[in-house]
Image: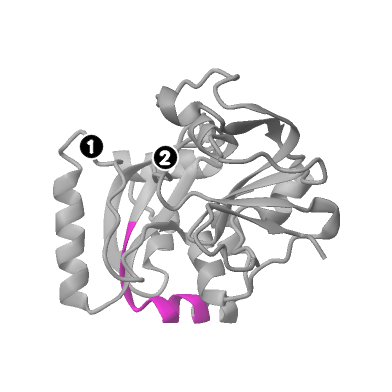
Amino acid sequence: MNGINQILSMPIVARKAFFDKLGFYTYALCEIDASNKRIPFYIGKGKNDRCLSHLHDKKITGKTEKIRTLFEQKKLGIDILAYKLDEPTSLIVESVCIDLLNIDNLTNAVRGHGDTNKRLPIYELMNVLRKDPITVLPEHKGIAFLLEKTFRHNFGDLEILEHTRGIWSRKQKDDVKFAYATFRGIIKEVYEIYTWVPAGTQQYFTRVLDPEKVRKRYEFVGKKASESIRNRYVGQLISKTRSFGDPFVKVGFE
């Protein structure tokens, strides 16, 4: 899947309608590495489809060459950092983000205030604004894990897996076949669940588990779902009921 190609393949009228909703915005061009981490290398601001204009830049510079190479390799990402701004505010946000490029913890998650100051890959934001959540099919029923407290924008495949598979206060029944890693309602990844085991059974490489919290808790053993299932759900806004404070909720159950 490539979110930028999906944007580019949209009908012109639909694409224009999406960008009209953004107003002025700031964005980051990101390199997507082998572990699926999104590493910003350029910050910009604009309106309309300004963030896509880099793909057509005729100038030959280090930046444009990097953009072309990453796009051809399907390793280029565009993240919207803030939108529905006025132009002076977009300039301020751009300036602050550029300053952050000079410090080591640029990719640390900073949860901003306000609904429009939340970093999202551009294709995911389009799905949020479209307000047309996808319904999990009965044959793909499972659990949506709400990673609101733990997800970070610099997570790669391993981090998302380790924060989704555990550790949970109760294990699920055998009819729960899939796990949906979600953040702010967007499906970040889908896993096929094989079985549930006591928490800490599997090795964790990106998390340090508290021994006290591991006791009487559980984690699942599984792998990424098939490509066809992932293509259907990843990046989509998920249709689900309220969790009422639980960190997970069933989806796809009739």
Residue displayed at 77% across by 40% down: 226
The reply, left or right, for residue 136 in relation to residue 46 is right
Residue sitting at the far right = 139
Q: Secondary structure at mark 2?
A: strand
Residue topped by disc 1: 105
Residue topped by disc 2: 31
Quadrant of the frame with the C terminus: bottom right
Asked whether the viewer can see residue 61, the reply is no
- Seen from the viewer's position, the closer of residues 219 and 104 is 219
Residue displayed at 18% across by 50% down: 98
In magenta stretch: residue 19: yes
Q: Is residue 26 above or below residue 201?
A: below
Sequence-wise, which precedes: disc 2 or disc 1?
2
The reply, left or right, for residue 45 in relation to residue 22 is left
In magenta stretch: residue 242: no
What whole-number distance in Å separates the C-alpha atoms at marks 2 and 1? 16 Å
Q: Is residue 16 above or below residue 222?
A: below
Q: Secondary structure at mark 1?
A: loop
Q: Which mark is residue 63?
A: none
